[in-house]
Structures are given as structure tokens and as C-alpha cells.
Image (tube, grey):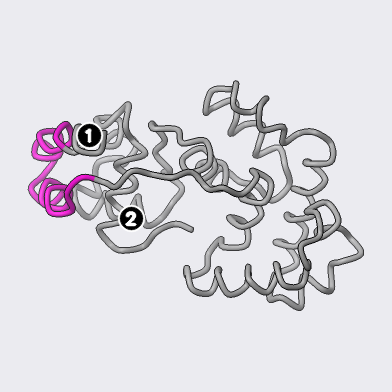
């Protein structure tokens, strides 16, 4: 599939500009993606922890969170009585509140993986952003990586958007540019991240 998408993208990219064509051609086909083996709720927590942090910093903080939780169920690890423990791991108050909200959503049955899989990407994102602290960017990451949706363009991701602008034109809306690559816009985002060596999580 990666080779077919790569071959399809090249003539589209060439129409949009030589820089974009070169970036995609030079990178070659994308490797096959393996969805995370973590449960959805835990994956969402890790994405929230990593927001606005470097990959290295996010990994370090998440490792401290896991160590502090001592393999406790997520519902027990992220609860009001553990706020100070989580803050000591390097998390902001907002991120701690978001982790607790995700744990509460799990307890309430709002993160039933089977039920969410039945929804289309847009409806699923709407369900996820109902959780406090889970924004559109986090929902896009879940759709792209956990649910393996092939046609997500995360326009709220600054790296993906600015890279596409740089490789095409700042005068053209990136949503319009990305639409040319439907139904494989997830792959376009992956090409942009790979181009600058800045994976999102």
C-alpha cells in the first residue's frame, strides 16, 4: 500500500510545486504503520502528556507517570487523590485534569473501543473532544494512529501545516492543498512530519 500511495502522490505533488514533489519523492514510500498496542484510554493519556513537548521530554515524563502509577488500573492511577503525585512527575495542572477526565470517561463507558470503531472519523472525533482536555489535535492523533484512519489531515498540527505551506504556498489554505491527496491525507501528514523529522508523539 505504501508504494501505491507514493506513486499516486508524486504527480499530485508535482502539480502543487517542485519542493513538495521533491520532499515526497526523496522520502520514498512510507513504512507500514502498526497501531499502538495500548488501550485507547491509555493512548489518549500519553498523547495529552506529550502535547507541546519534544519527543524526548514527553517520553521522560510519561516514564515517570508510569513509574508513579505502579501498574495500577488507569481509573485508579488518574484520580483526584493522586493529583500531587502526578504533578510531581512534571505534569501541568491542566494535563492532570485531562488525565482524570479521560479516566472518568473510561469509567463512564464513553471510551468503549468497539462502539467507537463503528463510528466514522468525524463522529468519533466529536465524541472524543467531549472529554475535558481532549482537543481536536488529540482526536486527530487517535483517529490517525490508534484507529488507523487513512484520510485525516491534522490542520491543527503546526509542524504538518507549516511544512506543507513551506513546500507549496502560504497563500493557499493547507486544507485545500491536503484535499488533493484524499482519501490518503493521513499519509500526507506523515510525509510532512518525516520531512522535518518531527513525529507527533
Say how many tags the image has: 2
Q: Which residues are magenta?
A: 7-29
- Please identify the quarter of the rendering in which residue 174 is found: top left
Residue indicated by mark 2: 193
Q: Quadrant of the N terminus?
A: top left
Q: Residue 67: within the magenta?
A: no
- Please identify the quarter of the rendering in which residue 195 is found: bottom left
Q: Residue at x 25, y 49 (%)?
A: 170
- Disc 1 crowd rating (10 Å Cα; few below 14, some 14-19, many 20+) is some
Vertical relation: 198 (above or below) 42: below
Dot placed on the residue nearer the N-terminal end, 1 or 2: 1
Vertical relation: 24 (above or below) 81: above
**How far from the left and from the top, in percent, is residue 65?**
70, 69
Q: Judge from the rendering whether residue 16 lies leftward or rightward of residue 189; answer left or right.
A: left
Vertical relation: 149 (above or below) 94: above
**How far from the left and from the top, in percent, is residue 40?**
64, 43
Amino acid at each position: 500500500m505504501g508504494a501505491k500511495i507514493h506513486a499516486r502522490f508524486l504527480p499530485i505533488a508535482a502539480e502543487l510545486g517542485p519542493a513538495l514533489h521533491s520532499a515526497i519523492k526523496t522520502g520514498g514510500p512510507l513504512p507500514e504503520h502498526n497501531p499502538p498496542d495500548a488501550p485507547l484510554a491509555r493512548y489518549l493519556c500519553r498523547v495529552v502528556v506529550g502535547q507541546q513537548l519534544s519527543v524526548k521530554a514527553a517520553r521522560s515524563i510519561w516514564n515517570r507517570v508510569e513509574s508513579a502509577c505502579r501498574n495500577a488500573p488507569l481509573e485508579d492511577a488518574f484520580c483526584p487523590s493522586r493529583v500531587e503525585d502526578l504533578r510531581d512527575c512534571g505534569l501541568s495542572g491542566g494535563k492532570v485534569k485531562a488525565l482524570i477526565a479521560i479516566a472518568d470517561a473510561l469509567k463512564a463507558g464513553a471510551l468503549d473501543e468497539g462502539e467507537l470503531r463503528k463510528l466514522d472519523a468525524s463522529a468519533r472525533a466529536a465524541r472524543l473532544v467531549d472529554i475535558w482536555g481532549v482537543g481536536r489535535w488529540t482526536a486527530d492523533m487517535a483517529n490517525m494512529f490508534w484507529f488507523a484512519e487513512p484520510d485525516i489531515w491534522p490542520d491543527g498540527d503546526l509542524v504538518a501545516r507549516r511544512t506543507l505551506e513551506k513546500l507549496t504556498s502560504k497563500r493557499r489554505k493547507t486544507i485545500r492543498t491536503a484535499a488533493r491527496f484524499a482519501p490518503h491525507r493521513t499519509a500526507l501528514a506523515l510525509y510532512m512530519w518525516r520531512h522535518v523529522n518531527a513525529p507527533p508523539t
